[in-house]
Image (cartoon, helix red, strand yellow):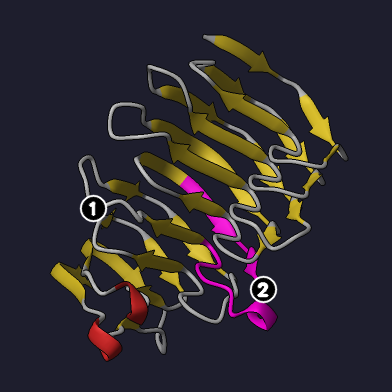
Amino acid sequence: FLTLNNVIIKDNIANVSGGGVAIYDRADMNIINCRIIGNTSDGDGAGIWILGSSTNKTIVNIDSTEIINNICQLNYHGGGIYIHGLNPSVVGEAYITNSIISGNSNRTGGGVYVGDHAYLEMEYVEISNNIAHPSSSGTGGGICISDQDDGDPPSIGKLTNVTIFGNNATYGPSIYLAHGNSFANIQNSIIGGDIETNQADFGNPSHLTIDYTNFTPGNEIRSDVSAGGQGVIYNLSTF
């Protein structure tokens, strides 16, 4: 593993993906006590771009780090963080603890985008004030999980003791789940914004599990079942 510790990555510009940090092709990394701020890209992952792209999965551990005000200029995916795997054998993985993902923007997954063959695990993370641009029918202001491949493994977001608030999008301001292979497991968290499962034209169900989680009054969990779409919500326990 390569380790970045107490590093500031700020105001960088990429005309492809990975404005601040690009991690791919088995380049596993630890990011600790860092600030990734104000980076821009003309592709995916303005803050951090993670891609499993060779014969082995790519693993990134992020702890006590701020990922703030990063912007994908051309309406791509993952303003703060983008995670993707090449195929079922080459998975992109991110483990994030004690961190803040705030003020990032793009069209899909303003804070975090979890794409095909990707795994995200978060604990004690704040996801706030990110934007998936409503003017472009943006999806997943805080987090978008979108696996377009029906094979195993599915794309998974596991969130524990996470606080999500103030994010903005047309569909799923807090969390948006698309495609039948998109899973979210939320435990002991605070959600201040709507969660939406499955965009209608994808057809297959997405999967959402919520346990012991506090929803801000007035927010909803919505399942889009029009045009063949189907969202599955199970093990729902909120307070």
Q: Is residue 141 magenta?
A: yes
- Is the residue 194 above or below the residue 143 in the image? below
**Residue furthest to the left:** 235
Q: Nearer the viewer, mark 1 or mark 2?
A: 1
Mark 2 is on which residue type? His
Which stretch appears magenta? 125-142
Q: Tell me the amino acid under the disc marked 1.
A: Asp
Residue 150 is marked as: 1
Q: Is residue 143 left or right of residue 117?
A: right
Task: Give whichever of 53, 97 is nearer the camera.
Answer: 53
Q: Residue 141 vs residue 182: left or right?
A: right
Residue 148 relative to residue 210: left or right: right
Mark 2 is surrounded, within 10 Å at the Cα level, by few (under 14), some (14 to 19) or many (20 or more) other residues, namely many
162 in relation to 108, above or below: above
Where in the figure is residue 45, as x and y percent of width and height? Answer: 64, 45
As rendered, which of 13 and 38 lies closer to the eye? Answer: 13
> Disc 2 designates what residue?
133
